[in-house]
Each structure stands twice: as structure tokens, then as C-alpha cells.
Amino acid sequence: MKLAAREKTVDYVVLTLFALFAVIPLIGVLFSAVTPPANNDGGFHVPTTIDLGNFSAAWSQGHFAEYMTSSVVVTVGVVVLTTVLAVLAGFAFARLDFRGSGLIFFVMLAGLMLPEEAFIIPLYFNLRQVGLTDTFASLILPQTAQSLAFGIFWMRNQFRTFPGEISEAARIDGARDLRVLWRVIVPPSMPSIMTMCVLVAMWTWNEFLMPLVFITSENHRTAPLGLAFFKGQHLTDFSLLSAAGVIVALPIVILYFFLQKRFISGMLGGIATR
């Protein structure tokens, strides 16, 4: 018991150190965001005066209304397309028997090992040739393809844990494959699907390289790209930069806050069989 208690203490100490290592910089950014610009030298200081006007100033000067709208359009498009395609493909690989399924699945998994830096330039020329650069489609379609490898891998593993006798009973009752999928398998799989959606939304929202290469007009810039341009214009205004950073990060924080129970349930439990 003493050994177990000692291990538990060490675990808590290590986790606390990692938590502090992650949280302290975030607290510093929040403190900087509410510090009056005249009192902000870029260091870690507890503000003596709270200035919430930094957020409105960053929002208006940085044109973040347009950037956030673009990010929402791209993120929603990628999440919806990825979810539908990943659910369909994951079901096919998990429950349907067709020739070459194993080979096709492992070829699709190659997308998990291929960094976007390896194909970003050829992809740019391909999109320019068909006239899709500087459009939302140039961000939604490639990021959907990029997320599908993980989405299919995730949903295949989740659907394989679903009790086979339930789906077979539905087939005996006359349900076809699509009806079995959407009416029988998907509802109890929602925690896993929501976990995938949160991860894909986070990756898409934070994507920087593709918007940097594919987007040239200001009205199509996403929030991270807009933040980079804003930083170049206000390099020494630490209060405005911190407020802008908080604005860009806030939607994902809110999304995770409201979906954290489903996210954790999907990570730990997978299929809900109740």
C-alpha cells in the first residue's frame, strides 16, 4: 500500500508540473490581454488595472469579424464533409466484406503519415489550374481529404466494437445496410462521432499553412492567418496581440467546454450500448 501511495503521489506531482507548464503561459496571455497598453512591456505581470477595451480594439482594427466568419465556414464545411464520409467509409471497412478492403484501408492510412508540406506546392498548382485558389473550396476540400484518413481509421475501429448481433437482428427484420448504419449503429456511436468532430474542428480552425498558400484576398482569410497579418502590424502592442490571440482561440475553447462530456466519453468509452 505504501508503494501504491508513493506512486500516486509521484503521478500527481508530475501531472501538476505538466499542468502548470501548460497553464501558466495561457494565464500570462490573459493577463496581457486585459493590461492597459501603456503598462504592458510584454512580461508576465498581474495587471493592476483591467482594460477590456483591448478586445474591442483588436476586433475592430484586425477585421476579425470577417476572419472569424471565414474560419467558421471552412471549419463547419470540413467537419460536416469529414463526418459523413468517415461514417460511411468506416462502416464499409468495418462491416462490409468486399475485395481489396484491407489494401484500400491501408492505402488510405498513408494520409496519416504524409505531412502537408510534402504536397502543398503541387496541390496549389492543381487548384490554380482548375480555378479554385482564393476560394473557400480550396480550403474545405483539401482539409477534408487530409482529415479523412484519421476519420476513417477512427470510425472503423469504433464500428468494429459494435455488437454484431444487433445489426444482424436489424437485417433479419428487413433493414438494408444504410438503414442499419444510420438507425442502429450511429445513434449509440454519437460520443465517438462527436470526439472526431471536435478533433477535426480543432485541427481545421488552427490550420495556417493552407490558407497562407491558397488565399490571397482579405475576405477569405481565416482567423489564424488574419492573426498573423495583425501581428505584423502591431508587433510591439502586446495588449492588442494578446487580446487578438484570445479572440482567435476562444471559439475552440467554448466548443470543447460544451462538448467535453461527449469528447471524454468518446475517448474512453467508444460505443454506448445502453
Image (tube, rainbow, N blue to C red):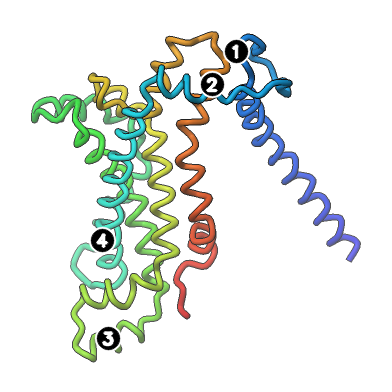
SS for callout 4? helix
Q: Inspect this view and state whether residue 117 appears.
A: no
| Number of disc labels | 4
**Left or right: where does residue 77 sit relative to residue 272?**
left
Q: Is residue 183 above or below residue 154?
A: below
Given contact means CB atoms under 8 Å apart, are the residues at marks 2 and 3 in contact? no
Which residue is label 2 attached to?
54
> Can you tell which of label 4 and label 1 is closer to the viewer?
1
Considering every residue shown, the one lying at the far left of the view is 130
Q: Residues within 10 Å of mark 1 (few under 14, many from 20)?
A: some
**Left or right: where does residue 135 sit relative to residue 36?**
left
Q: CA distance from mark 2 to mark 3?
A: 58 Å
Marked residue nearer the N-terminal end (2 or 4): 2
Query: Percent from the top left, x then y, of residue 229?
Result: 39, 16
Q: Which mark is residue 235?
A: none
Task: Say which residue appears at 35% left-offset and 29% top-offset.
Answer: 65
Query: Percent from the top left, x then y, of residue 10?
Result: 81, 49
SS for callout 3? helix
Q: Amino acid at mark 2?
A: Asn
Q: Is residue 122 above or below residue 71?
A: above
Q: Amino acid at mark 3?
A: Ala
Q: Which mark is residue 89?
A: 4
Q: Quadrant of residue 228?
A: top left
Which residue is label 3 attached to?
170
Query: Percent from the top left, x then y, of residue 269?
Result: 52, 67
Which residue is label 1 attached to?
37
Q: Amino acid at mark 1?
A: Pro
Marked residue nearer the N-terminal end (3 or 4): 4
Given contact means CB atoms under 8 Å apart, are the residues at marks 3 and 4 in contact? no
Q: CA distance from mark 2 to mark 1?
A: 8 Å
